[in-house]
Image: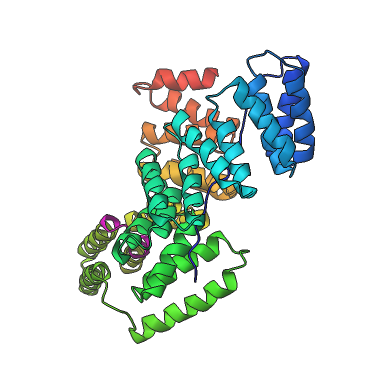
């Protein structure tokens, strides 16, 4: 499976006040159309806005936005003309330099593109997109050393999942397998929702016959993130192969991190068998810590799931798994774990807000209400918990009636509460 190098597409999002002046109104409508993908309408509106505002402080931005819209509409000549006008008005515009360079790449005018992108990288030393695009040009020329140099410069500016993934792919001739694996593991740790990092890491593990269970976990993550991708049938085939390797033990060399984690989980299982649940949980948490240090999300999940299996009555175990799932952007699974933790420890302050907020976000309002009611019952004697419940009714469920009821109970039942003035302020809102 060939790895993927994902390079960015810069979308300009400009905000203008619709204060009644025609160019401002046209610009606002043009930007809205551009963000909605109606590039023909956006080009027309933004061009008119730029033409109607000669000499204004926003003229360069308008020509730049019109150029981007025209480029998206396939009107290369107009796009180039508009972007050049923008640069004539503002030679320090990162967006105009970048978007003109990006369009010239699509026209295979690489030398000209390189000039504009180099200027973009210079005028805004905090941005990485131009350096990433320059790396893409270098790769098209087969110049892997220059690509790696550009991407390392980008990494020094911002160590993002996208940059790290691109660096791992571009540097495959420069880096060892372990270095490539490390870069990709760092990428999926930074952004578990970045599908190219998940696929590339699975591919590296697969091609080099490294940990097949880890490869399978990252193939599965890619399938969750990109279920409609045209590579999915091939990914399913490779996933089956990884499962076969796991069963047969067919690996190039043992994975020391997995061995360490599995040893700890074996000790956890032994402790659970002896009825020593607290000790079993500690071993699982140590396994999770070891996996975290190694940036192994697959082993973190293994350790946290083991904790919920071996110590099923531990709210801490279910909450930990829920936090991990939420960080992985697996929100439905996170809510299931939070709900189990909530059943075991209603009113637990650490759990209350994330569980109710997530339930509300997933439109599980009945569940969120049930969580609040059970927490109210469990924490009736704790004014801090009741205040949190009142706030969650207001913020997460927009239930003013219930929030005011809780606040009123606080006033009536806890006259010496140190935050009583805050409660009164909430009632007065």
Of the pair 206 and 85, the residue shown nearer to us:
85
Of the pair 212 and 288, the residue shown nearer to us:
212
Residue 38 drawn at (x, y percent): 76, 41
Of the pair 405 and 369, the residue shown nearer to us:
369
Query: In this picture, which residue range is highlighted in magenta?
Result: 292-301
Of the pair 16 and 102, the residue shown nearer to us:
102
Horizontal side of residue 276 vs 133, given as left or right: left
Q: Residue at x 44, y 44 (%)?
A: 354
Residue 26 drawn at (x, y percent): 76, 24
Q: Residue at x 35, y 41 (%)?
A: 156
* Residue 349, magenta (yes or no): no
Name the quadrant containing residue 376: top left
Name the quadrant containing residue 102: top right
Residue 45 drawn at (x, y percent): 78, 29
Magenta region's main secondary structure? helix
Looking at the image, is 322 positioned above or below residue 211? above
| Image quarter (top left, top right, bottom left or bottom right) of the C terminus | top right
Q: Residue at x 54, y 28 (%)?
A: 404
* Residue 300, magenta (yes or no): yes
Looking at the image, is 63 positioned above or below residue 344? above
Residue 331 drawn at (x, y percent): 50, 53
Horizontal side of residue 232 vs 248, given as left or right: right
Horizontal side of residue 223 vs 350, given as left or right: right
């Amino acid at each position: 499976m060939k790895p993927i190098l994902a390079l960015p597409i810069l979308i300009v999002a400009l905000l203008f006040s619709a204060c009644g002046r025609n160019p401002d109104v046209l610009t606002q409508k043009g930007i809205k159309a551009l963000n909605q993908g109606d590039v023909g309408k956006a080009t027309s509106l933004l061009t008119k806005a730029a033409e109607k505002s000669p000499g204004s402080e926003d003229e360069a931005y308008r020509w730049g936005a019109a150029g981007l819209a025209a480029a998206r509409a396939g009107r290369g000549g107009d796009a180039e003309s508009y972007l050049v006008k923008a640069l004539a008005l503002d030679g320090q515009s990162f967006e105009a330099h970048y978007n003109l360079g990006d369009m010239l790449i699509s026209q295979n005018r690489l030398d000209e593109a390189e000039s504009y992108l180099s200027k973009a990288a210079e005028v805004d030393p905090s941005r990485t997109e131009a350096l990433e695009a320059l790396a893409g040009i270098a790769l098209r020329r087969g110049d892997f050393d220059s690509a790696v140099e550009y991407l390392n410069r980008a990494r020094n500016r911002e160590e993002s999942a996208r940059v790290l993934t691109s660096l791992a792919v571009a540097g495959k001739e420069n880096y060892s397998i372990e270095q490539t694996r490390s870069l990709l593991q760092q990428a999926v740790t930074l952004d578990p929702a970045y599908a190219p990092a998940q696929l590339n890491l699975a591919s590296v593990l697969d091609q080099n016959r490294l940990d097949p269970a880890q490869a399978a976990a990252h193939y599965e993550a890619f399938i969750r993130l990109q279920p409609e991708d045209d590579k999915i049938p091939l990914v399913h085939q490779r996933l089956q192969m990884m499962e076969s390797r796991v069963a047969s033990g067919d690996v190039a060399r043992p994975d020391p991190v997995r061995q360490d984690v599995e040893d700890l989980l074996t000790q956890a299982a032994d402790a659970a068998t002896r009825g020593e649940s607290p000790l079993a949980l500690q071993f699982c948490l140590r396994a999770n810590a070891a996996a975290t240090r190694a940036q192994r999300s697959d082993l973190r999940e293994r350790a946290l799931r083991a904790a919920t299996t071996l110590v099923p009555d531990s709210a801490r175990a279910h909450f930990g798994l829920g936090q991990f799932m939420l960080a992985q952007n697996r929100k439905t699974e996170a809510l299931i774990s939070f709900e189990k933790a909530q059943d075991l420890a209603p009113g637990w302050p650490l759990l209350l807000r994330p569980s109710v907020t997530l339930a509300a976000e997933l439109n599980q309002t009945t569940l969120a209400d049930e969580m609040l009611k059970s927490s109210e019952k469990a924490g009736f004697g704790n004014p801090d918990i009741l205040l949190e419940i009142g706030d969650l009714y207001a913020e997460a469920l927009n239930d003013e009636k219930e929030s005011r009821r809780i606040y009123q109970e606080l006033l009536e039942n806890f006259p010496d509460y140190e935050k009583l003035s805050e409660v009164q302020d909430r009632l007065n809102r």
